[in-house]
Structure formats: C-alpha cells, structure tokens
Amino acid sequence: MRNKLIGGILAGAIFGGVTVADTVPLGSSGDFDITANVVPNCVILNGIPDQSVPYDPFVNTDTDIQYTGFSFKCVTGTSVTIYAESQNNPGGNFGHLVNTTDPAEILQYRVSLVVAYPSGPVVTEGNLFQNSLSFVAPNPNPPAITVETVIIASNQNVAAGTYTDTVTLNIQY
C-alpha cells in the first residue's frame, strides 16, 4: 500500500508538472517592412483671375499689369516646367489679343513669370509663350509668384475696341 501511495504522489507530481507546463503561452514573432512611395506632384492653390488693362498705342513704354495672387506648391525635388499658351495664337512666340469686332486687328503681348521660393531659388522667364520656365522644387512651401502680362506698345497702332485672348498657364511635372 505504501508503494501505491508513493506512486500516486509521484504520479500527481509528474502530471501536475505537465499541467503547469501547459499554461505557459507559446508564440513566435516576425518583422515586416513598410515602404511609402512619394510621387512628384504639384497643386495650384490660387488661380489667376481675368485681367483687364487700358492700352494707349501712343505711349512709348510697355503697358503691363502685375498679379501676385497666383500660387502653387510642389513636392520637394519635383522637376517643374511652366509655360503659357495663347488661345488666339497657339504655339506662337507671343500672345494675340484679337479685336472682338475685327479679328484682323491684333495686339501682341507676352507673359512673364517670377517664381521665388522662401528659402530657395528665384527663377524668371520674360516670355512664357516663347520659353518655358524650368526648375526643381526645393521645398514644399508655396513660392511667391508674380505673373506680369506685358503688352508691347511700340508699332501697335490698332483700331479702338475690345481685344481679348485666353491664356492657359501650364505647370508640368
């Protein structure tokens, strides 16, 4: 009987030990990588409203208007090209303001642009119809931009009337 009692105690200790071992949690772990792809991007924040300017063909200086409310921002490192297109002279070196009653009457003009980043370069182009403006965006802060429409006064003695054109300002990236 004594052997059975000792055997029972030993069996209880052994099986009790197995029960304790079963309550320890088992598991494993693994690592994984996360990759974020930031793509080049530009967004126009404020567009350009319609512009109107009085024109006197007998003044010997250019007639111009400056507009500084246009703004955009680009992802850092984005290659940017800005150019303008005249609806009345697509692909031409100048924009054409066309008389609304006599399409043969045309005023040539150009659009220039100054882009100045707060802590980066200042880039300028005097005629966005003829030459594009290209640069790499140095930081995501919106640059200060001046759009200047210049109507060349010399040799443009045209008929009185209203002259219009639509300009498309393109930002490619």
Image: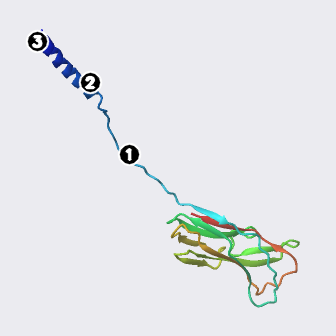
Q: Quadrant of residue 135?
A: bottom right
Q: Residue furthest front?
A: 2
**Residue 131 at least partly seen:** no
Q: Which badge, 2 or 3, comes first in the chain's sequence?
A: 3
Q: Which badge, 3 or 1, comes first in the chain's sequence?
A: 3
Q: Quadrant of residue 124?
A: bottom right
Q: Are marks 3 and 1 in contact (CB under 8 Å)?
A: no
Q: Alpha-carbon distance for marks 3 and 1?
A: 57 Å
75 horizontally vs 33: left or right = right
Image quadrant containing the C terminus: bottom right
Amino acid beneath label 1: Phe
Mark 2 sits on what residue?
A: 19
Q: Alpha-carbon distance for marks 2 and 3?
A: 24 Å
**Element under disc 3:** helix
31 horizontally vs 160: left or right = left
Mark 3 sits on what residue?
A: 3
Q: Which badge, 2 or 1, comes first in the chain's sequence?
A: 2
Mark 1 sits on what residue?
A: 32
Q: Residue furthest left?
A: 3
Q: Quadrant of residue 61?
A: bottom right
How crowded is the residue under tag 3: few (<14 C-alpha within 10 Å), some, or many (20+)? few
Q: Alpha-carbon distance for marks 2 and 1?
A: 35 Å
171 or 159: nearer the viewer:
171
How crowded is the residue under tag 2: few (<14 C-alpha within 10 Å), some, or many (20+)? few
Q: Residue at x 17, y 18 (%)?
A: 9
Marks 3, 1: nearer the viewer? 3
Q: Which mark is residue 79?
A: none
Could you tell me residue 60's position as x and y percent? Answer: 76, 91
84 horizontally vs 142: left or right = right
Amino acid beneath label 2: Thr
Q: Residue at x 79, y 90 (%)?
A: 59
**Residue 81 at least partly seen:** yes
